[in-house]
Image: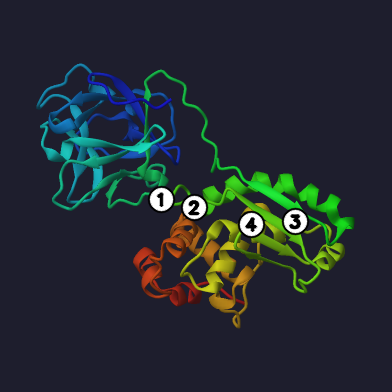
Amino acid sequence: MSVAPQNGQLFTLRSANGLTVDVNSSQATAGNRIQGWKPNGSQAQSWVFWAKDNGSWLLETGLTHGTHGPGQAMVLDYNFSAGVTHLFTEHGDANQRWLFEDAGSGWYRIKSVRGNEGDRYLTAVGEGVALALRSPSWGDPGQRWELLPVGSRPQPQQPGGQGVRITLDAGQAPDLAGWLEAQKPVLETWFPKTVALIIGDAYAAPAEYRIVLDRSNTGVAYASGGMVSVNPDYVRRNPGDAGFLIHEQVHIIQQNRVVPGHFVEGVADWVRNYHFESGGLPFVRSSDKYTDAYKTTAYFLNHVATHYDGDIVRKLNVAGHDGSYDGDDQWWRARTGKTAQQLWDEIPKR
């Protein structure tokens, strides 16, 4: 389990997205990339903590353990001209010293002491990619770190981890009570998975909600507040469809404030089509628009997640919840270099 920093001790640093701080190819040479990599227990993933002034720490690679001192050891260095980390000879300046901020539950955020560029936090971006120094984004699992004493066995991380209490009401359709009970464990299993996909730890998902079989509902289903209303006649016609309940459960988790409706529905179908089920639309047509919502917008989201940013759906959902979404032009351009329409236009169509 994660522990507090200790002077002279060896630790492995692992992010909440499962990547460790790793010296590329175990080469202790100045300028070598320090990257995110899957845990392997090598010296390239062990770091000696040396206490410095004002509560900061210098992190020496285990590859040079025993040579601590200016001009000798190789340490975790903030290459501020590139905005990433690399290995460099110890000199102890601000860009080689790090502050460990308590993020709760044994997690830390690691901030560079150098403040010329504003607050910059160590961020695991992807496997084989240099660790970045980025502005704080507390919903980003790449900015949460745990310290594991070298030789300890990390506990496996579970996606999400938040449970939910689901109350069922089949009073208006007692013949479907058994069907509704059969869906409950599926929804309970997928609740934490969905939280991991579209929230991370950016905000708290509801602890409970209820599902009501409602004869006044003439559609399929809808979510409102902490309740999902289901049309019993739809269930009778489609008893094999559990995916629509996954879709509505996404809405319960979203708690959207500002994202347009096409993206609200698109996120819900993205979880349903590309994670719960085996896939979404096989293609889109020239007459389709990314604003069509549901499966079409889910197709758009999956395209962006595949070709630009694998975390884009979570970022979009969080922006909808915290109110930071600023439009289909600005928001998408800031994260992909293109507007939503430009991203849609590049998708092949039939």
Task: Tally the marks.
Answer: 4
Q: At label 3, which amino acid type do we have? A: Ala
Q: Secondary structure at mark 4?
A: helix
**Mark 1 and mark 3: span between their CA atoms?**
29 Å
Question: For this rendering, which residue is in front, 138 or 66?
Answer: 138
At horizontal 63% and vertical 68% (from top left) the residue drawn is 295
Residue on which disc 1 sits: 139
Q: In the figure, residue 15 lies in which quadrant?
A: top left
| Rendered-image quadrant of the N terminus | top left
At horizontal 14% and vertical 30% (from top left) the residue drawn is 90
Residue 180 appears at what percent x and percent y? 79, 53
Residue density around tag 3, few if under 14, some if 14–19, many if 20 or more, within 10 Å: some
**Given contact means CB atoms under 8 Å apart, are the residues at marks 1 and 3 in contact?**
no
Residue on which disc 2 sits: 199
Residue density around tag 2, few if under 14, some if 14–19, many if 20 or more, within 10 Å: many
Residue 8 appears at what percent x and percent y? 23, 18
Residue on which disc 3 sits: 242
**Given contact means CB atoms under 8 Å apart, are the residues at marks 2 and 1 in contact?**
yes
**N-terminal label among 1 and 3:** 1
